[in-house]
Structure formats: structure tokens, C-alpha cells
Amino acid sequence: MNPVVNETILEVVKLAYEAGIFVQITAGYRSFREQHELYERGRTNKSKPIVTYARGGQSLHNYGLAVDFVILSDDGKRALWTDGEKWTRVAAIAKSLGFVWGGDFELFRDFPHLGMSGGLSTRDLQKGWRPNPISRVASAISENEAERENG
């Protein structure tokens, strides 16, 4: 995983927890082969749903620039896929720290997906270009400390 992506998703989990929302990371880096296998789901076995439109090399996961997550119930035993308010809140936290949320995608809304490409496309990544994301975690920590002191 890109170190900034890793640091930032851990901060998202922490801030969500402080807001009373339990987040669990379900995926990070995927090899091209793993991505291709995921792409084949729902295509080779029509009884399963299609879960991605990205083949191997076409996903930010393949470059360590994306994570998937799930929101858990308050007891931590069930995945919550339909609680819009909690998804929106976690997305807002993630976006404030520099992630792009898959729930904002127009073609295929991917609510569990967060990515940080630094403005590069997957075509750019395939050409060997790499982003240099800048961490916003330190500024978020400073803002939270200031809020606690004033609050």
C-alpha cells in the first residue's frame, strides 16, 4: 500500500470510531491476477452479481492506492450495507482527508471503495506514472485537538 493511503485510511477508521461508527477494512492492494478474478465474478458465473468493471491493471487497488471497507453494526457482528447516513458520514470523513469515494461514481456506484490517485488515471498508472499524495492526517489531528480544546 502507498504509505499515505495506509496512514489516511487508518485515520478514517479512527475518526469514524470517534463518531460512533465502526469501520472495517476489507481490501487494499490487489494483484492484477486477483483483480482479474474479481472482474470475472458475475461474468463466468452468471448466478453471482458483477462486482467490478475494472480488469487487472485498471483498478487503483492494483497500485496500492485504494481500499474497500464495510460499516459494522454497533455490536460488530454484522455488515451494514444499507445505512445511508453512516456511509455518507464515513465518506465525508474520507473525502476531507483526500480520498475519492466510490459512492460518488456515476457509472457504477461503489460505496465500499475509497481511492487516492493524486489526479492520475489508471492509464497513467499503467504507463508507470505514480502519484505523490500528500498526507492530510497531521492537519486533521490538529483540527480535532483544537475542537476538543474549544468544545
Image (tube, rainbow, N blue to C red):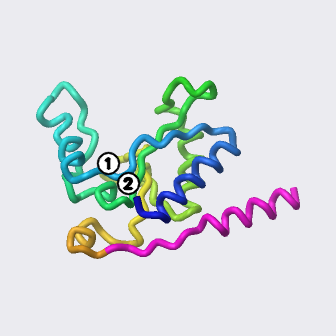
Residue 1 percent coordinates (x, y): 40, 58
- Name the quadrant containing residue 42: top left
Dots 1 and 2: beta carbons under 8 Å? yes
Spatial separation of the CA atoms under disc 1 and disc 2: 6 Å
Local packing at callout 2 (Cα closer than 10 Å; few below 14, some 14-19, many 20+) is: few
Helix, strand or loop at label 1? It is loop
Residue 18 image offset from top left, x and y in percent: 70, 45
Residue 56, percent from left and from top: 20, 53
Which residue position is annotated with label 2? 105
**Residue at the image point whose x is 38% and y is 73% from the top:** 131
Q: Is residue 34 magenta?
A: no
* Residue at the extreme right of the image, as rendered: 150
Residue sitting nearer the eye, 23 or 89: 23
Q: Is residue 18 left or right of residue 86?
A: right
| Numbered disc 2: secondary structure | loop
Magenta stretch: give its range.
130-151
Residue drawn where x is 55% and y is 46% of the image: 88
Instruction: Specify the amino acid type for callout 2.
Output: Phe
- What residue is at 50 percent from the left and 30 percent from the top? 80
147 within the magenta span = yes
Label number found at residue 44 = none
Disc 1 target residue: 108
